[in-house]
Amino acid sequence: MIFTNPSILFISIWGLIGILFNFQLSNVLTDLKIETIVLIIISCSAFAFAYMIYFLMYKNPILYPYFDIKKNFTQIINDNVFKKIKKLVFFWIICTGIEIIIAGNLPLLSILGFGKFVGYTDFGIRGLHGFLNSIFLFLASFYFLKYKITLERKNIFIVLFMIAWTILVVNRQLMLSLLIELLFLHLITTKIKIKKLLKLIALVILAIVAFGLMGDFRSGREHFLEIASPNFYYPDYLPSGFLWVYIYMLTPLNNVNFNITTIEPTYIPLETIILLFPSFLRDNITSFIDRPEQNFILVHDSFNMSSFYPALLIDYGIELLFFPLLLSALLFLHTMHKSNNNIKFALTLAIFLHAIAMSVFTNFFTHIVFVMQIFIVIYVFNRFKYKKVTRLTLAK
């Protein structure tokens, strides 16, 4: 699947964003500025140039990866890996149990009126919760792959439980990240045929509807329609998820577009590096650093995402933005090249592709949760053993 190529994915996503923005289907959207157009062109050029370098420099370059899980199943299912997985599962269950006890409830139950009220932003122990999310995302990927290898129902039930968990804690971002990573992992490990592609499209539509329902549950459909302010008639029978996706895809760039001429570059990569620290440390670090105040204004208070661009614009400006994106793209493409035969790189590629997909909303390129997820991948699969394989039945 060509969309597992980081360069093609990035160019496709941001090209689509530019086209959809020009449709101006919402009164919330501002007129596209020339600086924003230049910003998108420079970014896409960096990823295109990176693929050109990759194609010329690497032996046997590929257009997109395919990791054969049936052929390489011992990389995923062996006793050494299972021991580490058990440790991660035990750690996640114990620490999550402690978080529930401290919070006194789950966010969804409190919204439904059961027990103590716990806001979805208040759930979890600061500093620990992000690490638990890293483990959570990795375990979901592992059991998803294990299901694809064996077709054992217990594995897909585990994955479904993990999706349900994101609903229990009312965390749409975690649910979205989970689904996107699993989608890319599926594409990397599957030879896509028309029938499978149609099923995939159906699942994506279902995810969009679910995303909209969660949004309606939290904010209310009519309230959201009023805020989104579509400049066309949005029929009642159409799930609000489609409008949610359109608005949430474009309003981050809308905020960047509104502020792009007032952002003052520092030419110091602090905004991107600071995300490598836990949230409670970030506040302490930034309080000791004297930086020019950025008067970043939201077009609408309800849409506070601003894509991955503000941090890059502050750190590098439009003038130097090309170079960090070029280096990132080369790293992603190197990972893609290695992912054909190594599960460690295949899983890491899914995380990188997720970061590209989510660049529409925020910067996950250097976010600690997903960087830690990569370290967990390395921890589990760095030195796997082929000799001892737990008894299993491969899916036919």
Image (spheres, helix red, strand yellow):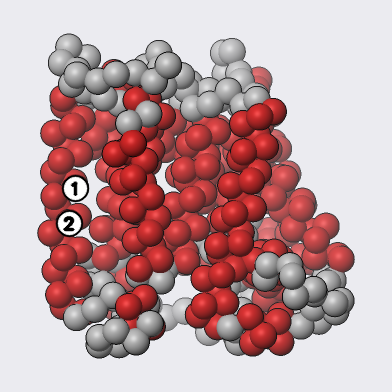
Q: Quadrant of residue 147?
A: top left
- On the image, the x and y values in percent for residue 182 come to 47, 43
Seen in the picture, residue 129 relative to 61 is either above or below; the reply is: below
Q: Amino acid at mark 2?
A: Ile
Q: Which residue does the image show at 21% across and 23% down from the upper left? A: 78
Q: Amino acid at mark 1?
A: Val
Q: Is residue 346 above or below residue 387?
A: below
Q: Secondary structure at mark 1?
A: helix
Q: Which x, y percent locates residue 92?
A: 19, 55
**Residue 307 position in % (x across, y down):** 60, 65
Horizontal relation, residue 186 to residue 150: left or right: right
The dot on residue 93 is 2
Dot label at residue 89: 1
Does residue 94 appear in the picture of this structure?
yes
Location of residue 129 (image quadrant): bottom left
Q: Is residue 19 left or right of residue 14?
A: right
The mark found on residue 45 in the picture is: none
Foreground pick, 46 / 380: 380
Are the two marked residues, 2 and 1, in contact with CB atoms closer than 8 angstroms? Answer: yes
Residue 154 in the image, given as x and y percentages of width and height: 29, 39
